[in-house]
Image (tube, rainbow, N blue to C red):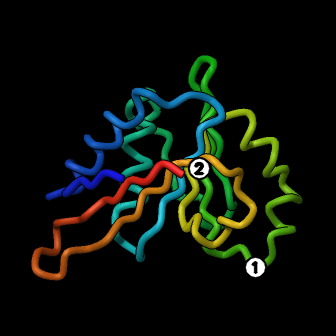
Amino acid sequence: MEEFISKSEQDTITFAKNFAKNLKNGDIIVLTGELGSGKTKFTQGVLEYFGLENEISSPTFTIVNEYKKDDINIYHFDVYRIEDIDELYAIGFDDYLENGICIIEWGERIEDVLPPHYTKITFSKDESNLDYRKLVIEIL
């Protein structure tokens, strides 16, 4: 387990860009934490690393946004509104997991259906400094 203290949105983006250097198709990153804790900023940093900074949009209403750069596929999920796991399977969730880098916001809601190996990053706000975030990185 590793911890990172972000002191700004840019810190979170920079951390994510560095984190992204080792990502490859098949990697799964589960992002957990309350609303506004930095999950989307992290995703922005990953996309910036791959030169896709102008592409990001929230998948809140579409469940998944797909990005492609050369031979890398990036799938950005927001499963907050998933009511039933069958909704994920209906969109081919298993295929996404095998064919790209999957970043799953609110991923704690579907941990029961994830493969055994993934990276979980938990974001928490600092009550004494509204710009600070603690990121706890676990390799599961």
Residue at the (50%, 40%) spot, across then down: 55
Q: Residue at x 23, y 55 (%)?
A: 9
For disc 2, the marked residue is 76
Residue type indicated by callout 1? Glu
The mark found on residue 47 in the picture is: none
Circles 2 and 1 in contact, beta carbons < 8 Å: no
Answer with left or right where residue 42 lies relative to residue 29: left
Which class describes the residues within 10 Å of circle 2: few (<14), some (14-19), or many (20+)?
Answer: many
Disc 2 residue type (three-letter): His
Q: Residue furthest left?
A: 128
Q: Pinpoint residue 88: horizontal percent, then vertical percent.
A: 79, 61
Label 1, on which residue? 83
Crowd around label 1: few <14 · some 14–19 · many ≥20 (10 Å): few
Looking at the rendering, which quadrant does residue 51 occupy?
A: top left
Residue sitting at x 84%, y 54%: 91
Which residue is depicted at the point 65% across and 42% down?
66
Q: In this view, does 56 lie to the left or right of 16?
A: right
| Disc nearer the start of the sequence (2/1) | 2
Calculate the distance from the C-alpha at mark 2 to the C-alpha at mark 1: 18 Å
Q: Where is residue 5 in the image (x, y as percent from the top left)?
A: 19, 57
> Which of the 4 image quadrants contains residue 77?
bottom right
Residue 1 is situated, as x and y percent measured from the top left of the image, at: 36, 53
Does 118 sit left or right of 132 as displayed? Answer: right
Q: How many marks?
A: 2
Q: Is residue 106 above or below residue 89?
A: below
Quick one: SS at disc 2?
A: strand
In this orientation, which residue lies closer to the viewer: 80 or 52? Answer: 80
